[in-house]
Structures are given as C-alpha cells and as structure tokens.
Amino acid sequence: MNNTITVLTQLYVLTEQNGYRRPNPARQAEVKRLRDRLPEDMLRRFDRLVAHGQRPIAPPSESGACGCCHLKLPPDQILDFRRAPDQVHACPHCGGVLIASRPLREAEATARLICACDDKRRH
C-alpha cells in the first residue's frame, strides 16, 4: 500500500482524536512525526480542508460520490480509483483525498490503540 495513504489516514484519525480529548504530548508528538513525513502540497490541502470543517480523507461512496464533499465523481476517476485503490486520488471538486476504506479502518484501529495506551498511563 502507498505509504502516503498510510500516513494520511493515521494523521486524520489522530487529528480527529485530538479534537475530542485533552491535548496529549505523546499524541501530539505522533501527529508532528506524521506531518513531517507528508509532502508539503498534500499537507496544505489536508490543513485547508480541516480548517474549513471538511473531512480531508474518505473513501468514495458505493454510488460513486466523494466521501468528503458527497459530489458525484467523474466516471473516469471512479475507474482510475478502482484500478489503483492504493494510490492517492484527489476529488476534483473539494480536493479531498479518496482512499479505499481498508486503510482508514486500519488507521482507526491504530489510533484506538494509541488512545487506549494514553488512557492507561493517566490512571
């Protein structure tokens, strides 16, 4: 799988977790480490979408719509995505990153483990 997708999904999930909890130094260090591994243009797009309250990364829907903005994707882009789900694909409407749902589920599981470890250290 594409390393950029792995880093983006982990960053997205950890960023979401930071929004719901108190700041945690270990989690903030992991977010910084992940941000340092992303290309500058990808990070700018990610930050812009988060700042505007949009999901920066999501799988496309079964009907062929962007998982971030929910607008219908062009048929050729849907075909490209299905041919190469492990590549980075951007929505032409919102710029969100389209990914297969498996990497997102894996990143969510990893983030839950990190948060569980954080919670155990506090108690």
Image (tube, grey):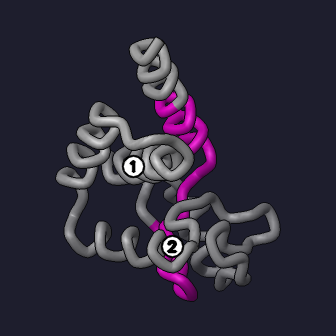
Q: Residues within 10 Å of mark 1 (few under 14, many from 20)?
A: many
Q: Quadrant of residue 77?
A: bottom right
Query: Where is residue 71 shown, x and y percent of the image?
Result: 71, 83
Q: Are marks 2 and 1 in contact (CB under 8 Å)?
A: no
The residue that mark 1 highlights is: 11
> Which quadrant holds the N terminus?
top left
Of the residues shown, which amino acid type is indicated by label 2? Gly
Query: Where is residue 76 shown, x and y percent of the image?
Result: 61, 80
Sooner in the amino-acid sequence: mark 2 or mark 1: 1
SS class of the residue under badge 2?
loop
Q: Residues within 10 Å of mark 2 (few under 14, many from 20)?
A: many
Front in this rendered view, residue 44 or 18: 18
The residue that mark 2 highlights is: 96
Q: Magenta part of the protein: which range?
A: 89-111
Tell me the residue at 54%/69% (across/down): 80
Nearer to us: label 2 or label 1? 1
Query: Where is residue 24 shown, x and y percent of the image?
Result: 36, 36
How many numbered discs, if any? Answer: 2
Tell me the residue at 43%/17% (across/down): 122
Of the residues shown, which amino acid type is indicated by label 1? Leu
Structural distance between the alpha carbons of marks 2 and 1:
14 Å
Query: Where is residue 16 shown, x and y percent of the image?
Result: 52, 51
Determine if residue 9 is in view. Answer: no
Toward the right, the furthest residue is 63
Q: Quadrant of residue 83?
A: bottom right
Tell me the residue at 42%/63% (across/down): 88
